[in-house]
Image (cartoon, grey):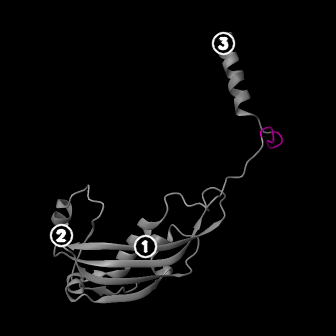
């Protein structure tokens, strides 16, 4: 059974300059959970409605939490501290979203609605905030000295050299 998620009217939030504070359990965010080692913890969020300098409806989203990842260098647990604050503008639909200039890195736009799902939006932003290759600061991969191979393992380069000699002999 799907878990209900709070919704809000994105354009009204901006017009009234209201704010919404809350938190959501990581266990309630299944797409984000696919990237994590455990389902423990929460993401905290704060939405503040704004009207930008050009009169567009938007919101400042602040998202914080600790996300349990795995370091891709040493394969040990890594707690990623998510602390992201981003300004978004709300657009009415796909055509308006597609009309925005691609080159403008300053604009983060999202399709707004009268029943915008907070948890889904938070989950999207948390996933986009994850590091491409998680690793500890200063982490280096374990080094295996040359010649320190497993007993009985064949050196692949020796095997290639032997194949080269066999082909050259024919």
Tell me the quarter of the image containing the N terminus. Answer: bottom left
> Which quadrant would residue 90 be assigned to in this image?
bottom left
Residue 68 is situated, as x and y percent measured from the top left of the image, at 57, 72
The Cα–Cα distance between marks 3 and 2, rounded to whole angstroms, is 66 Å
Query: Badge 3: few (under 14), some or many (20 or more) residues near its Cα, within 10 Å?
Result: few
Which of the numbered marks, if any, corresponds to residue 93? 2
Using the image, determine if residue 30 lies above or below residue 23: above
- Residue drawn at (31%, 84%) of the image: 48
Q: Which mark lies nearer to you, 3 or 2?
A: 2
Q: Which mark lies nearer to you, 2 or 1?
A: 1
> Which quadrant would residue 149 be assigned to in this image?
top right
Residue at the extreme front of the image, as rendered: 53
Task: Give yes or no for residue 148 being in the magenta stretch.
Answer: yes
Start-end of magenta stretch: 146-152
Tell me the quarter of the image containing the C terminus. Answer: top right
Q: Mark 1 points at which residue?
A: 84
Query: Badge 2: few (under 14), some or many (20 or more) residues near its Cα, within 10 Å?
Result: few
- Residue drawn at (39%, 78%) of the image: 62
**Tag 1 or tag 2, which sits nearer the N-term?**
1
Query: Badge 1: few (under 14), some or many (20 or more) residues near its Cα, within 10 Å?
Result: some
Q: What element carries label 3?
A: helix
**Tag 1 or tag 3, which sits nearer the N-term?**
1
Secondary structure character of the magenta stretch overall: loop
56 vs 21, left or right, is: left
Q: Name the residue under label 3.
A: 168
**Tag 2 or tag 3, which sits nearer the N-term?**
2
For the question of whether residue 24 can be seen, the reply is: yes
């Amino acid at each position: 059974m799907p878990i209900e998620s709070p919704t809000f009217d994105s354009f009204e939030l901006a017009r009234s300059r209201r704010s919404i504070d809350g938190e959501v359990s990581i266990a309630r965010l299944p797409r984000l959970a696919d990237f994590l080692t455990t389902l423990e913890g929460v993401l905290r969020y704060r939405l503040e409605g704004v009207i930008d300098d050009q009169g567009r409806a938007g919101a400042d989203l602040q998202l914080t939490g600790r996300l349990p990842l795995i370091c891709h260098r040493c394969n040990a647990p890594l707690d990623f501290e998510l602390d992201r604050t981003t300004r978004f503008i709300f657009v009415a639909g796909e055509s308006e979203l597609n009309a925005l200039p691609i080159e403008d890195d300053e604009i983060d736009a999202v399709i707004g609605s009268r029943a915008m799902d907070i948890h889904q939006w938070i989950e999207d932003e948390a996933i986009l905030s994850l590091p491409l290759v998680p690793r500890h600061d200063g982490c280096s991969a374990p080094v295996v000295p040359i010649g320190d191979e497993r007993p009985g393992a064949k050196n692949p380069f020796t095997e290639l050299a032997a194949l080269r000699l066999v082909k050259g002999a024919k």
